């Protein structure tokens, strides 16, 4: 999906990934992240957000919940992260990464509510009165009041499979009244997802019906006299879309793919954020006229369409473009098929929209790429843990 943008915006990243693979410093099925470019993307996002009066919560699932990279970004001026599920909240909190927003796409389970409350997140999202009541009770027991957000749903809204959650907009008044009766929580915010999406036909990022529901909810609450401090509108957050969100009065959003430049709008390499992540693997074998790469990092919504195949020899710098064949829903991505026959052991670089946290891949953080002196800072699991073992020293 992003190979052309990669070649245009960050050919140095290709070179660094290939060199590390040829040296044996990284294995196939590794995402290589250009740390310096991620930080530069982060600076651009932060400046644009500050210019438009929007606060950004960092999203780390796309980069494998990596605490080292999150910490480096926080040093730029971000206050903390959004943990979209409780596993992410657990992992990042163990690394002392400040949690600003928890419970967004997945609620906090009973056994973690007190732990999360004691970390004092800016806000928790609740999807049910039962969860709101539990948070209120636990918060009361430890002597605090937790700010919460709710997500209201209209019939026309778009929800991804597996993410169906929220209160129905028709029940708003009743829901708010019941939440206001819970002394351990305070309703301070509204959220929805996805609020912006890329439109292939119009080649633009556009508001979804979800954003309209978010705004309609805010207006109704304002008329009810309920003060809302946070209007949180995640998805497709980037330097180009922050001005649009500001026009709608949005106060918070949560960039993820923009940090690595892998937003759909950047498929041609024209966005301010530059590509900062590649996937590298190698050809395992051929079968029935096709070549098969070692898998583990395939993401079925990634729209990967091609890769750059190259020799394992350090004397060759020639790349061949190979089509990546689609995998159906019955697959386990032990291997990723390529059209054509390529020598066993050939390297393959791909660049596509991914969510590292749902893969089995390694994550290699590399600094110094932009100055021509790449240094392998560390290799992590897809869940943000520093790897140990014979391959990595």
Image (cartoon, rainbow, N blue to C red):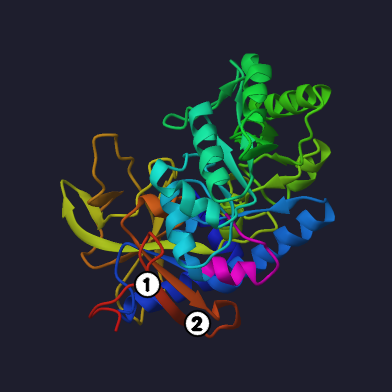
Give the Cα separation between the discs numbered 2 and 1. 19 Å
- Residue 357 picture location, percent across and down: 40, 53
Between 315 and 85, the one lying in front of the other is 85
Between 367 and 165, the one lying in front of the other is 165
Residue corresponding to mark 1:
386
Q: In which quarter of the image is residue 171?
A: top right
Task: Say above or below: 32 vs 131.
Answer: below
At 62% from the left and 55% from the top, the residue drawn is 269
Position of residue 141 in the picture relative to residue 333 (left or right)? right
**What range is drawn magenta here?**
69-81
Residue 70 inside the magenta-drawn segment: yes
Position of residue 379 in the picture relative to residue 67 (left or right)? left
Q: Residue 374 carries which label?
A: 2
State the SS at label 1.
loop
State the SS at label 2.
loop
| Residue 206 shows in the view | yes
- Residue 6 picture location, percent across and down: 54, 60
Position of residue 386 in the picture relative to residue 220 (left or right)? left
At 67% from the left and 29% from the top, the residue drawn is 180
- Residue 347 picture location, percent across and down: 32, 66
Position of residue 118 in the picture relative to residue 337 (left or right)? right
Between 156 and 290, the one lying in front of the other is 156
Tell me which numbered mark, 2 or 1, is placed earlier along the sequence.
2
């Amino acid at each position: 999906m992003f190979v052309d943008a990669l070649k245009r915006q960050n050919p140095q990243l290709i070179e660094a990934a290939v060199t590390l693979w040829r040296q044996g410093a990284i294995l196939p099925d590794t995402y290589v992240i250009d740390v310096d470019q991620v930080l530069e993307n982060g600076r651009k996002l932060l400046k644009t957000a500050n210019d438009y009066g929007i606060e950004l919560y960092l999203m780390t699932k796309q980069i494998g919940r990596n605490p080292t990279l999150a910490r480096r970004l926080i040093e730029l001026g971000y206050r903390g992260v959004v943990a979209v599920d409780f596993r992410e909240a657990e992992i990042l909190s163990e690394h002392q990464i400040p949690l600003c927003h928890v419970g967004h796409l997945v609620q906090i389970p009973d056994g973690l509510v007190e732990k999360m409350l004691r970390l004092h997140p800016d806000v928790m999202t609740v999807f049910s009165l039962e969860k709101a009541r539990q948070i209120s009770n636990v918060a009361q027991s430890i002597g605090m009041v937790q700010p919460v957000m709710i997500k209201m749903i209209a019939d026309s809204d778009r929800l991804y499979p597996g993410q169906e959650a929220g209160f129905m907009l028709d029940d708003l008044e009743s829901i708010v009244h019941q939440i206001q009766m819970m002394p351990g929580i305070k309703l301070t915010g509204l959220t929805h997802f996805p609020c912006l999406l890329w439109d292939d036909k119009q080649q633009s990022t556009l508001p979804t019906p979800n954003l309209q529901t978010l705004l309609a909810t805010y207006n109704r609450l304002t008329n009810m006299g309920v003060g809302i401090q946070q209007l949180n509108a995640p998805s497709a957050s980037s330097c180009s879309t922050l001005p649009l969100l500001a026009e709608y009065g949005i106060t918070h959003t949560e960039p993820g793919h923009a940090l690595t430049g892998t937003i759909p709008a950047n498929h041609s390499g024209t966005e301010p954020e530059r590509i900062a992540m590649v996937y590298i693997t190698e050809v395992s074998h051929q079968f029935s006229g096709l070549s098969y790469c070692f898998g583990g990092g395939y993401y079925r919504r990634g729209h990967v369409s091609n890769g750059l195949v190259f020799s394992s020899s350090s004397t060759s710098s020639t790349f061949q473009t190979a089509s990546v064949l689609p995998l159906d829903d019955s697959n386990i991505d032990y291997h990723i098929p390529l059209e054509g026959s390529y020598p066993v052991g050939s390297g393959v670089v791909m660049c596509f929209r991914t969510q590292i946290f749902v893969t089995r891949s390694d994550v290699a953080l590399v600094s110094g790429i932009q100055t021509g002196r790449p240094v392998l800072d560390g290799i992590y699991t897809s869940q943000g843990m520093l790897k140990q073992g014979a391959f990595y020293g």
